[in-house]
Image: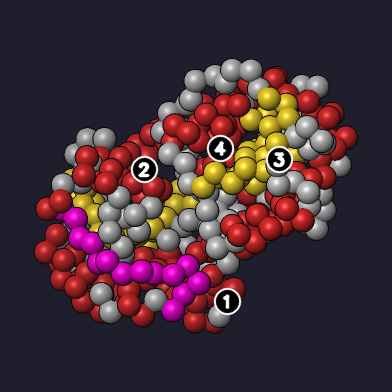
Amino acid sequence: MRLVLLGDGDSPHLLKWARALALQADVELWAASSRGFAPGFEACVPAARRLALQTQPRAHGGNIGLLRQLPRLARWLQHVDAAWIHAHYLSSHGTLAWLAQRVYGVRARIVGSAWGSDVLLTPERSALQRWLLKRVLRACTLATSDSQVMAQRMRHYGAGELMVFPFGLEALPLPPGPKDDTLFFSNRALEPLYAPARVLQQFAQAAGISGRLVVANDGSLRSTLQQQAQALGLAERVSFVGRLDAAAQAAWYGRARWYLSLPQSDSVAVSVLEAMAHGCVPILSDLPANRELVQDGVNGLLVPAGALLPVQRLQAILQHADALASGNRQWVAQHALFAPCVAAFVARLRSLS
């Protein structure tokens, strides 16, 4: 079964899909990227089966440069003559797949994987974006979602058959060693969507004088956040460590008792699953997708919009934090490992072929 991955080849998330699909028997994997390709693609998709469009798409739209590459992409897809185009991020790459099929007569059927904001935020920006999403979803023979709440929204916009499974872990990490009850970790992008200023405020509210916060990742708000930490008197207790490799990130997960993720909008985030697998106590925005993972006060904490949790709530959950960590790891092992989900996904594609 010949399948083309269509997405951002610089993304570690698309690379994870490529690694999982490359392990499936009888799948001949090809890949087209709106940008370039991360080095890891060399191990799972030969260069002769890859197309890099080398554009610079933006999350907030206006990607005329990407649309200009449509004729080139369509010619390549016609040459590949795959059974499936697997488009990741529906409002951009899904649109390209739909147009290649509709305008250029590419024969491959489309399977679309939603990533979050392409369904939860983008269609709210304009009538045109809603119209495009509806057309893309109706063109998909099959679509995937990583949460029930996003699947419900996709059905609202006209999706047909849906598979719902978390964008899970490739392997369960080793059980964590002793945890530092004073250590908080956060690694969402330092961009407005992920509300990193709220992370600093929550830390200041709940950490006490001995608490420390490690902020990984990077983004446009980094310098503003560093100034905010200074203004809050936290400069000596907050470390901005930038983007980390997998080993360094796993080390912080393993040591930290607390994991902070407080975005304005989200689906099931792989970073939250990673934190749960490493035995961190997740402190999350009170969003529908997070309620699929966390029962407030039982296996984590949910922060209502516009609020901050008092330190007493963290102290209360510390009384059973080790049992919580064990239960969360078990849940991830049973429900959020990626390989079994991808195997079921490929089996469904075969049955539809």
The residue positioned 53% from the left and 35% from the top of the image is: 274
**How far across and down, in percent of the image, does residue 250 sit?**
50, 31
- Circles 3 and 4: CB distance less than 8 Å? no
Per the rendering, the mark at residue 237 is: 3
| Badge nearest the viewer, 3 or 4 | 3
Query: Which of disc 1 and disc 4 is earlier in sequence?
Result: 1
Write the residue at 69% across / 58% down: 227
Task: Check disc 1 and give the amino acid type.
Answer: Arg
Whether 40 is drawn above or below 134: the answer is above
- Say if mark 2 contacts mark 4, CB within 8 Å: no
Judging depth in this view, the residue of 103 and 193 nearest the camera is 193
Horizontally, residue 149 falls left or right of residue 333, namely right
Amino acid type assigned to the residue bearing label 2 in the image = Lys
Q: Dot 4: few (<14), some (14–19), or many (≥20) neighbours within 10 Å?
A: many
Q: Amino acid at mark 3?
A: Arg
Q: Which residue is mark 2?
A: 16
Mark 2 and mark 4 lie on one chain; the one further toward the N terminus is 2
- Which element carries disc 3, helix, strand or loop? loop
Q: Secondary structure at mark 4?
A: helix
Q: Position of residue 27 (x, y in %)?
A: 21, 43
Q: Residue at coordinates 43% horizontally, 64% vertically from top-left?
A: 90
Q: Residue 162: horizontal and vertical position, in percent? A: 46, 53
As measured in the structure, the alpha-carbon distance from the residue carrying label 2 to the one carrying label 4 is: 15 Å
Does residue 122 show up magenta in the picture?
no
Residue where numbered disc 1 is placed: 125
Determine the secondary structure under disc 1.
loop
Q: Is residue 91 above or below residue 25?
A: below
Distance from disc 4 to disc 1, alpha carbons, whole Å, reads: 29 Å
Tell me the magenta residue range: 49-62
Question: Which residue bears the numbered disc 4?
Answer: 273
Marked residue nearer the N-terminal end (3 or 4): 3
Pick the residue in front: 235 or 20.
235
